[in-house]
């Protein structure tokens, strides 16, 4: 397993997206894009396969993180997936589980939790 180096962030809240980006970059990862919807993310993935995706579940009117994970895995079957979500809804958590993510982290993120999860990916 080669270490992950590149990732895309899908988060509809700009402040949370900025925090996630900063954490990832400070940990040494190259953030290829930050998007806030399924449609934006699909455009970002059109030409390349990042090593990982960090996504929220609820993207407001922009869809769900599960939708983008399923779409990207059609083109990039080896992509690693980390959900960062504030949901506690059992049905949504079950839906997340169907995508077989490498990690599911709860918001708010404690210090170093995201970084530790990314490091565990490889």
Image (cartoon, rainbow, N blue to C red):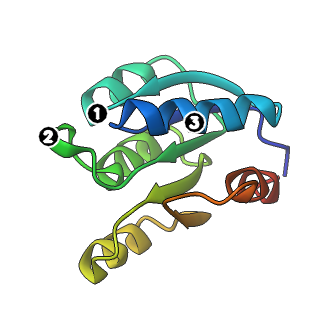
The residue to which callout 3 is attached is 19
Q: Are marks 2 and 1 in contact (CB under 8 Å)?
A: yes
- Secondary structure of the residue carrying numbered label 1: loop
Report the side of 45 relative to 109 (left or right): left
Q: Is residue 13 above or below residue 48?
A: below
Is residue 6 shown to the viewer in this render? no
Q: Earlier in the sequence, mark 2 or mark 1?
A: 1
Q: Nearer the viewer, mark 3 or mark 1?
A: 3
- Residue drawn at (20%, 37%), measured in percent from left and top? 62
In the depicted view, which residue is nearer to us: 25 or 1?
A: 25
In the depicted view, which residue is nearer to us: 26 or 8?
A: 26
Other-residue count near label 1 (Cα within 10 Å), few / some / many at <14 / 14–19 / ≥20: many
Q: Is residue 98 above or below residue 75?
A: below
Other-residue count near label 3 (Cα within 10 Å), few / some / many at <14 / 14–19 / ≥20: few
Quarter occupied by residue 31: top right
Q: Nearer the viewer, mark 2 or mark 3?
A: 3
The residue to which callout 2 is attached is 61
Report the side of 20 relative to 41 (left or right): right
- Secondary structure of the residue carrying numbered label 2: helix
Residue extending furthest toward the left: 61
Is residue 84 shown to the viewer in this render? yes
In the depicted view, which residue is nearer to us: 78 or 18?
A: 18
C-alpha gap between disc 2 and disc 1? 8 Å
Report the side of 48 relative to 94 (left or right): right
The residue to which callout 1 is attached is 37
- Residue drawn at (55%, 42%), measured in percent from left and top? 53
In the depicted view, which residue is nearer to us: 27 or 40?
A: 27
- Residue drawn at (54%, 45%), measured in percent from left and top? 54
Give the x, y percent position of residue 79.
Answer: 60, 46
- Secondary structure of the residue carrying numbered label 3: helix
């Amino acid at each position: 397993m080669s270490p992950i180096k590149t990732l895309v962030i899908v988060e509809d809240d700009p402040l949370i997206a900025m925090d996630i980006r900063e954490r990832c970059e400070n940990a040494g990862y190259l953030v290829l894009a930050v998007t806030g919807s399924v449609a934006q993310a699909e455009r970002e993935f059109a030409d390349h396969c990042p090593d990982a995706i960090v996504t929220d579940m609820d993207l407001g009117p922009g869809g769900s993180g599960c939708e983008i994970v399923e779409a990207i895995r059609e083109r990039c079957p080896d992509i690693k997936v980390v959900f960062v979500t504030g949901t506690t809804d059992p049905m949504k958590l079950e839906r997340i589980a169907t995508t077989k993510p490498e990690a599911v982290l709860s918001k708010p993120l404690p210090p170093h939790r995201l970084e530790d999860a990314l490091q565990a990916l490889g």
